[in-house]
DNA sequence: CTCAATTTGAGACTTAATCTCAATTATAGA
DNA sequence: TCTATAATTGAGATTAAGTCTCAAATTGAG
């Protein structure tokens, strides 16, 4: 409840009011963490705070994204999805069937340092996606 | 017109019919190449082939994506955008104001080799995005 | 040419995301 | 504890992206 590293607490520290709807969204993100769409966050959030509205979900996601605490990813379907922003997130995405595989290995530290300096940019996290064809779809291709 | 490396030619090689609408879409992508949304492609394509329909734009983009010739990217706004798929595409994206900076440097070859083997995956291209705050937005942050 | 199979356009439709504004709520300060 | 004020919210309207349908048009093999 009083986890100072929690998303809700971080919102408060950043000067935003600590409201029940925001706490519900934060709790959902912390519990499930992975690849959540705004719709899923809304549904789960309403189990915690039934009056939660779609607009508030989007507003809270925007706030958390601006603070660098969560981050949108894209998995080849219609809606954005969010993950907690800790370091990197990495996928192999099949551009044919849409299958996505996660992997961990990625050494971006060097590049982060270089870019931060060159662009005066403060990097919170990154997304690395490789596009191509998976084992199943590979044989179906003509090219 | 008869560029065998052209997108339209590649469609034909892959066994699809070479139609005027597809040629229009291909031509737009080849001329402008960078960060085009389906809407923009539709508008420009209609300057070449006025009857071009939205559905055909999406259908052609899907075909070209499946063949690995173009690739969707995401720049923190509502719509997907497409780029020609040559190797990698790299951005620094400010999660506050949405500004995006391109950079070239990226050494993914090693990782591509490892992943291809491990997942039996055929990699065509990749997207590397770093999220954080740009020079202008950095001072505005409290956290 | 002819003709079967593919492809297309128009517009209906679905769904994601944004916007509006009156009502509610959090919090600083008395 | 009690206001007062500004921030935040929910409901639903609205906009916009993307998909689907099907009759008509087009391609390209034969
Ligand atoms: Zn696949
Ligand atoms: Zn993932
Ligand atoms: Zn910025
Ligand atoms: Zn770019």
Image (tube, coloured by chain):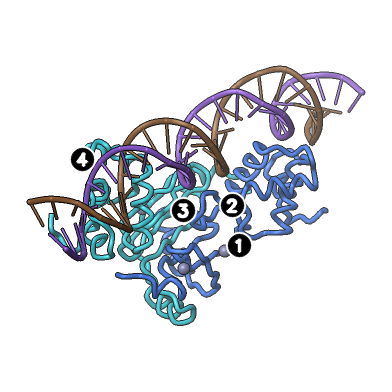
Chain colours: A cyan, B blue, C purple, D brown
Where A128 sits versus A25, above or below?
below
Q: Dot 3: within a 10 Å radius of its alpha carbon, few (fewer than 14), some, or many (20 or more) residues? A: many
Q: Dot 2: within a 10 Å radius of its alpha carbon, few (fewer than 14), some, or many (20 or more) residues? A: many
Q: Are marks 3 and 2 in contact (CB under 8 Å)?
A: no
Please state if A141 lies on the left or on the right of A15 as rendered.
right
Q: Could you tell me which secondary element the residue under label 1 belongs to? A: loop
Q: Residue at x 64, y 46 (%)?
A: B39
Please state if A126 lies on the left or on the right of B15 as rendered.
left
Q: Nearer the viewer, mark 1 or mark 3?
A: 1
Q: Which residue is mark 2?
A: B68
Q: Residue at x 67, y 50 (%)?
A: B40
Label 2: chain letter: B
Q: Which residue is mark 3?
A: B121
Residue B86 badge:
1
User: In the image, are marks 3 and 4 on the same chain?
Assistant: no
Ligand 4 within 8 angstroms of badge 1 C-beta: no
In-front residue for pair A10/A131: A10
Residue A48 badge:
4
Please state if A110 lies on the left or on the right of D19 as rendered.
left
Q: Are marks 2 and 4 in contact (CB under 8 Å)?
A: no
């Amino acid at each position: 409840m009083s986890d100072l590293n929690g998303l809700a607490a971080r919102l408060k520290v950043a000067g935003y009011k600590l409201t029940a709807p925001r706490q519900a969204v934060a709790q959902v993100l912390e519990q499930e963490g992975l690849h959540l769409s705004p719709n899923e966050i809304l549904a789960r959030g309403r189990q915690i705070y039934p009056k939660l509205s779609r607009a508030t979900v989007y507003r809270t996601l925007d706030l958390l994204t601006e603070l660098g605490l969560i981050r949108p990813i894209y998995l080849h379907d219609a809606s954005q999805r969010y993950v907690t922003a800790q370091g990197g997130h990495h996928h192999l995405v099949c551009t044919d069937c849409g299958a996505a595989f996660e992997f961990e290995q990625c050494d971006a530290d060097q590049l982060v340092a270089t870019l931060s300096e060159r662009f005066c940019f403060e990097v919170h996290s990154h997304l690395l996606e490789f596009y191509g064809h998976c084992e199943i779809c590979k044989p179906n291709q003509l090219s």
